[in-house]
Every structure is written in C-alpha cells, then in structure tokens.
Image (cartoon, grey):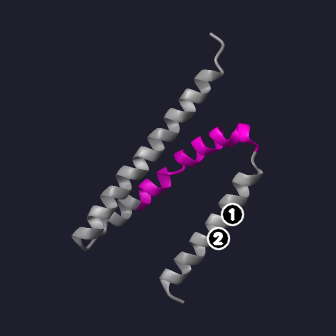
C-alpha cells in the first residue's frame, strides 16, 4: 500500500472523527474547543520544522516555510481567542 493511500485514509478518518466530535459538543463549548485545537497546532509547527530542515529541494523548503508561518498564525490566533474569551468572564 502506497504512502499516498495511507495518507488519504488517515485524512478521511480524521475528517469523519472531527465531524462527529464537533457535532456532539454543545455550542457554548465550541470556542474553548477551537482554542485548544488551535494550540495543538504546535505539533504542526514541529512537523513543518523537521520537514523543512531535511528538505532536499527548494520547493519543499518553500512549502515548509509556508506551513510554519500558517501553523504559527493558527497557534497565536488560538491563544488570542482564548484570552479574549477569558476576558469576557472576568468580573472586575
């Protein structure tokens, strides 16, 4: 079985599992769940760093840098959303 087919299986299973998980979460918990999921994108940063460091072509390096930038934006955005959400619950 090729790596591409295994990757496709993982993608489809992750999509179905994610849809089922989000569908069962009450709407009031969507924002904290989304914030936590964005923070977990740190794993994507580590993966992109590893791939970029071992890149053998210029195209892979460029894609790796783009992946690092996008994952970093996602992590920072997740923390900003969490901070903004927590501000709503403060009683100052």
Total numbered labels placed on residues in the image: 2
Q: Identify the mark at residue 17; answer none if there is no mark.
A: 1
Give the vertical position of 65 relative to 51 (above or below). above
Badge 2: residue crowd in 10 Å (few <14, some 14–19, many ≥20): few
Q: Is residue 92 left or right of residue 66?
A: right
Q: Quadrant of the C terminus?
A: top right
Q: Tell me the SS state at disc 1.
A: helix
Q: Residue at x 75, y 47 (%)?
A: 25
- Outermost top residue: 92
Where does residue 54 sit, x and y in percent of width and height?
31, 69
Instruction: Look at the image and give the residue range highlighted in magenta.
Output: 26-47
* Residues marked 1 and 2 touching at CB (< 8 Å): yes
Q: Tell me the SS state at disc 2.
A: helix
Q: Is residue 38 left or right of residue 89?
A: left
Give the vertical position of 36 relative to 67 (above or below). above
Q: Residue at x 55, y 27 (%)?
A: 84
Q: Residue at x 67, y 42 (%)?
A: 30
Where does residue 74 sit, x and y in percent of width and height?
46, 46
């Amino acid at each position: 079985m090729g790596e591409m087919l295994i990757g496709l299986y993982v993608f489809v299973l992750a999509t179905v599992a994610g849809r089922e998980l989000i569908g069962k979460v009450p709407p009031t918990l969507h924002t904290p769940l989304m914030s936590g999921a964005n923070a977990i994108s740190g794993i994507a940063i580590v993966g992109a760093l590893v791939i970029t460091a071992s890149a053998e072509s210029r195209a892979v390096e460029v894609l790796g840098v783009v992946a690092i930038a996008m994952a970093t934006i996602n992590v920072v955005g997740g923390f900003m959303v969490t901070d903004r959400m927590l501000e709503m619950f403060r009683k100052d």
